[in-house]
Image (cartoon, rainbow, N blue to C red):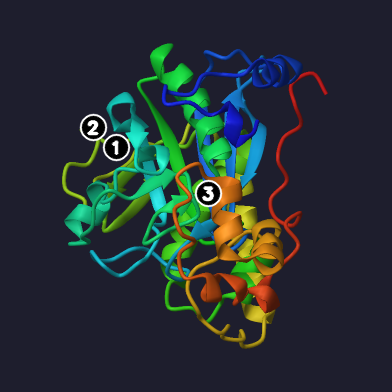
């Protein structure tokens, strides 16, 4: 898919993408889920396959995100958000100034209750960010077509999980001295549940935090900042045991890790493939290559730096995911 393939109409699924879905046992109409990783500058699209669980459809490199690792707290801080979001059909924008886009819904219920501010945090095209996640026009167009089809086929809303990095024990240990570690440990609970089950985690908010796969006496908690009501025992003790084992591994990794090196903060990140193009071709040619709007690359000097180079860990570490059905 190239810029010549883009039109003013909302993008539709290509025959190539439909063939890729069929190859992986996925229907175009099946539910979708998205995961975003800042440090790796990658966005993953997952769809339910014939096993009834989510499987990875495609990973997209992000051209730009802004801010640093950590949640977005206030309007104007240039922070890209971290947390759990849900996107409905009305949050899709087929006529974005950055080609097409969808709104993450920041601030969510928890963030609003905590007093976090900001609006219009998007996944969009072009290579410019002041709190959004920016991909190529081609990439966001393909993602838009995938999620639009799922939403028009019965999925009420799809979940977006936005993380600072792949939440492996090794990566957590590398960031053990970060002020956001407690918050990231909460995010890791949702990450691990998805890794272990390949099912979308149910997200509740109470006690000033996310709670996952919990059923509460009296129904869902109404007040995010108040203590969580009593919960019903988990119907899957084996899964809870595996979660406890992963937490024990994390505790051990944190205790064994030395002091983490504070990386040199510049401004956000860019996937290495785009950083190489930026270095080779310059910001104007990169902007023209990846977006029909030719919107300027945001803070190109900062994008050339890689403040996380020393902290990048092996992405294969972490909890063991289940094999595909039938294996």
Under circle 3, the secondary element is: strand
Identify residue for label 2.
219
Quick check: marks 1 and 3 in contact, CB under 8 Å? no
Q: Distance between the residues labelled 3 and 2?
A: 30 Å
Q: Which mark is residue 48?
A: none
Tell me, yes or no, whether the two marked residues, 3 and 2, touch with CB atoms within 8 Å.
no
Decide if residue 34 is on the left or right side of residue 232. Answer: right
**Quadrant where the C terminus is found in the figure:** top right
Of residues 222 and 18, which is closer to you in this image?
A: 18
Q: Which of marks 1 and 3 is nearer the N terminus?
A: 3
Nearer-N-terminus badge (3/2): 3
Question: Measured from the top left, where is residue 61 in percent x and y?
Answer: 63, 49
Instruction: Find out whether the residues at labels 2 and 1 contact each other: C-beta distance under 8 Å.
Output: yes
Element marked by disc 1: loop
Q: Where is residue 310 in the image (x, y as percent from the top left)?
A: 69, 78
Classify mark 3: residues with Cα within 10 Å, few (<14), some (14-19) or many (20+).
Answer: many
Label 1: few (<14), some or many (≥20) within 10 Å?
A: some
Of badges 3 and 2, nearer the viewer stands 3
Measured Cα–Cα span from mark 1 to mark 3: 29 Å
Q: Residue furthest right?
A: 327
Residue 205: % across, % down: 29, 47
Q: In screen coordinates, is 141 left or right of 311?
A: left
Foreground: 316 or 273?
A: 273
Question: Circle 2: is it few (<14), some (14-19), or many (20+) Cα within 10 Å?
Answer: few
Q: In this view, does 72 lie to the left or right of 144?
A: left
Tally the numbered discs.
3
Q: In this view, does 114 lie above or below 321?
A: below
Residue 192 can be seen in this image: no
Q: Position of residue 162 (x, y in %)?
A: 47, 51
The label shown at residue 216 is 1
According to the image, label 3 marks what residue?
Answer: 36
């Amino acid at each position: 898919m190239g810029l010549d393939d883009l039109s003013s109409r909302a993008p539709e699924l290509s025959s190539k993408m439909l063939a890729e879905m069929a190859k992986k046992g996925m229907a175009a109409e099946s539910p979708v889920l998205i995961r975003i990783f800042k440090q790796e500058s990658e966005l993953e699209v997952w769809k339910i396959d014939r096993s009834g669980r989510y499987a990875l459809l495609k990973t997209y490199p992000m051209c730009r995100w802004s801010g640093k690792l950590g949640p977005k707290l206030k309007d104007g801080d240039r922070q890209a958000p971290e947390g759990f979001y849900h996107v409905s059909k009305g949050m899709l924008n087929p006529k974005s100034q950055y080609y097409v886009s969808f709104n993450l819904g920041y601030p969510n219920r928890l963030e609003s209750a905590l007093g976090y501010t900001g609006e219009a945090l998007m996944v969009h095209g072009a290579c410019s960010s002041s709190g959004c996640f920016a991909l190529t026009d081609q990439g966001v167009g393909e993602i838009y077509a995938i999620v639009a089809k799922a939403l028009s086929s019965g999925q009420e809303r799809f979940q977006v999980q936005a993380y600072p990095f792949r939440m492996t024990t090794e990566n957590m240990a590398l960031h053990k001295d970060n002020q956001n570690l407690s918050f990231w440990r909460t995010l890791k609970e949702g990450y691990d549940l998805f890794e272990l089950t390949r099912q979308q985690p149910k997200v509740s908010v109470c006690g000033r935090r996310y709670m996952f796969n919990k059923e509460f006496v009296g129904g869902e908690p109404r007040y995010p900042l108040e203590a969580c009501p009593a919960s019903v025992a988990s119907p899957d003790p084996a899964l809870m045991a595996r979660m406890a084992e992963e937490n024990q591994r994390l505790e051990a990794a944190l205790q064994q890790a030395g002091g983490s090196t504070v990386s040199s903060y510049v401004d956000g990140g860019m996937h290495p493939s785009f950083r190489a193009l930026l270095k080779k071709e310059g910001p104007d040619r990169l902007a023209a290559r990846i977006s029909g709007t030719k919107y300027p690359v945001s803070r190109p000097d900062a994008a050339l730096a890689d403040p996380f180079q020393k902290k990048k860990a092996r992405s294969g570490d972490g909890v063991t995911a289940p094999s595909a059905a039938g294996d």
